[in-house]
Image (spheres, grey):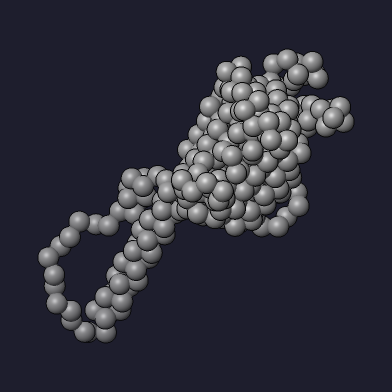
Amino acid sequence: MFSRLREDIANIIERDPAARNAWEVVTCYPGFQAIVLHRLAGWFWRHDLKWIGRFISYLTRIFTAIEIHPGATIGRRVFIDHGFGVVIGETAEVGDDCTIYQGVTLGGTSLNKGTKRHPTLGTGVIIGAGAKVLGGFTIGAGAKVGSNAVVVKEVPAGATAVGNPARIVQKDNGNPKDAVAARMFAAYGVMPGGDDPLSKALHGLIDNAATQEQQIEKILAALKCSGIGCETLPELDKFDPASLNRLVQ
C-alpha cells in the first residue's frame, strides 16, 4: 500500500510543475486524495460491502468534488489534475499512466445492468478538460481527447479526437521523443497544430479551388494565344482564398 502511495506522489511531482513536495501533494491535491479513497471504497465494494463502498465514494465526492464509482477500475500512476467535476462510472476502466483533467465524464449510455456501460481507457490516455466519453468502447493506448470533446465511439491507439461529436485528427507518428513530449505536456489534450478536421477539410477545399482557378486562367490565356476564342461570360467577383481561409479559422 505504501509503495503505491509513494509511486502516486512521485508521479504527480514528475508530471505537474506546480507540485513542490510530497506533503503538498498529500494535503492539497484532490485527485490524489480521490484515488486513495477510491481504493478503500473499491475494497469494500469487491467484498460485498457495497453500501460502505458507495458511502465512502459519496464522502469523497463531497470533499474532493470528484466522483469515482467504487466499481470502477483505476490503474497505476493515474493523474487526475485539478479534478473538479470529474465523474467516472461503475464499469469504467482507466489504464496505467492516464491523465484526466477537470470536468471529465466517463459515462454510460445504456440502462442495462450487468453490461459494460462505461468506457475503457488504454495506457497513457489523456482526456482534456470538460471532455465527455460516453459508452462502453475503448480509447486506445496513447490516445488524446481534446477539451470539451464528446466521444461516442472508439478512438484508435495514438489518435487525437476533438469536437462534438469527436472526430479523429491525427495519429501518433511513432517517434519516441514526440510520444514522451506529448505525455509530459498536451496540457488539455490538444496538441499544437491540432486543428478541427472539419476546418482542415475546408481549408483544403479552398486551396484546391484557388489552384483550379489559376489553372483555368492559364488554359484560357493559352487558348487565346492560339487564336481559339472562348465564350465570354459575365464578370464575377475575384476569388479570394485568403479571406475565405480567415472565415473558417
| Of 157 and 132, the residue lying toward us | 132
On the image, the x and y values in percent for residue 88 come to 58, 36
- Identified at 33% across, 45% down, the residue is 247
On the image, the x and y values in percent for residue 32 come to 71, 25
- Identified at 31% across, 66% down, the residue is 213
Q: Is residue 3 visible?
A: yes
Q: Residue furthest right?
A: 3
Numbered-mark total: 0
Q: Please say if 131 is above or below 166.
A: above
Q: Residue furthest front?
A: 48
Q: Quadrant of the N terminus?
A: top right
- Identified at 34% across, 54% down, the residue is 241
| Of 189 and 46, the residue lying toward us | 46
Left or right placement of residue 67 versus residue 220 in this view: right
Which picture quadrant has residue 226? bottom left
On the image, the x and y values in percent for residue 239 come to 27, 57
Q: Quadrant of the C terminus?
A: top left
Which picture quadrant has residue 180? top right
Q: Please say if 173 is above or below 41.
A: below
Q: Is residue 190 visible?
A: no
Left or right placement of residue 241 versus residue 238 in this view: right
| Of 169 and 94, the residue lying toward us | 94
On the image, the x and y values in percent for residue 164 come to 42, 45
- Identified at 71% across, 31% down, the residue is 44
